[in-house]
Amino acid sequence: MPVITLIPELEQILHQTMQASGGESAGIEPGLAERLQTSLSQATQEQELKGEPAVLLTSGVLRSTLAKFVKNTIPSLRVLSYQEIPDEKQIRIVQAVGN
């Protein structure tokens, strides 16, 4: 299963931001939110051009917040947590987003 991930540093920043803001995506700094949305949109388009599903794989803590974050702007991007992937399912990271 091809997946998109966040680079560990970005995932850590988002996790800290969610904790500080009580779990709300509104706590993400606007510039970071815009860059994240742009990067995820590009990664999704690349997957769709290959005829593959666009799946963002992230931590369980961030899953719900990120799903809400992309829901209206990138509706074809599915957001899953590592815990939702069966052990026997092989994943292939096709892109790591964040800079």
Image: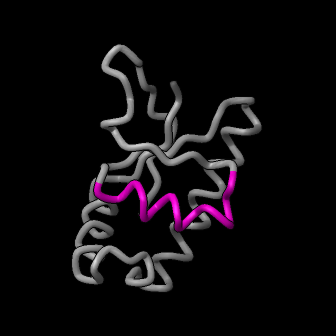
Q: Residue at x 41, y 18 (%)?
A: 89
Q: Which of the 4 image quarters holds residue 14? A: bottom left
Residue segment shown in magenta = 61-75
- 60 vs 35: above or below: above
Looking at this view, name the residue that lies furthest to the top. 88
Q: Residue at x 71, y 48 (%)?
A: 45
Q: Residue at x 40, y 54 (%)?
A: 63
- Give how far across and how far down residue 17 sits, in percent: 29, 77
Q: Is residue 73 magenta?
A: yes
Residue 57 as seen in the image, left or right of residue 69: left
Query: Which percent across, then down, holds residue 86?
Result: 36, 23
Main SS category, magenta section:
helix
Q: Is residue 92 above or below residue 54?
A: above
Position in image of residue 30 (x %, y %): 49, 85
Residue 79 colored magenta? no
Seen from the viewer's position, the closer of residues 57 and 98 is: 57
Vertical order, 73 against 53 (above or below): below
